[in-house]
Image (cartoon, rainbow, N blue to C red):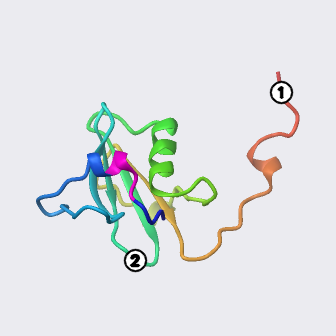
Amino acid sequence: MRTIVPIELEMGRIRNGPFGTVTGVMYGAFTIGVIGLRVISSGPEQWEHVSVSLDHRCPTWDEMCMIKDLFWTEQEDIIQFHPRASAYINCHRYCLHMWKPPYEVKLPPSLLIAPTVRIT
């Protein structure tokens, strides 16, 4: 996770209440952008974690990418999970999560992510 808090996060930082935090830390609650993405970043634990939510819809891929770039550098691999049914927990219908484990993540081969030849 970044060590210097981007200005976009500081501007949206929630400073009071149960999720309130002080200036300069990467964890806490934030409201980001004109649509009011609600973001919660967990405190310094083994797994780095950020949740992103809206009232009436899930965040888009582009919104998740923007939040990812606020919390982590472009060279860090971040994970979104789809857990098995027996482990599934849903506290908020329109909330998505990102995690970074305390170890290097092995990515799948790039061919499984996207073809090397453009399909038209």
Q: Residue at x 26, y 38 (%)?
A: 55
Does 47 sit above or below residue 8?
below
Q: Earlier in the sequence, mark 2 or mark 1?
A: 2
Specify the amino acid type for callout 1: Ile
Quadrant in the picture for residue 93: top left
Task: Judge left or right: residue 8 versus residue 71.
Answer: left
Tag 2 residue: 45
Mark nearer the viewer, 2 or 1 = 2
Determine the secondary structure under disc 1.
loop
Asked whether 102 or 55 is in front, the reply is 102
Marking on residue 97: none
Q: Which residues are magenta?
A: 5-9
Task: Judge left or right: residue 29 versus residue 86.
Answer: left
Marking on residue 119: 1
Find residue 7 and report its horizontal and vertical position in percent. 36, 48
Q: Residue at x 30, y 39 (%)?
A: 54
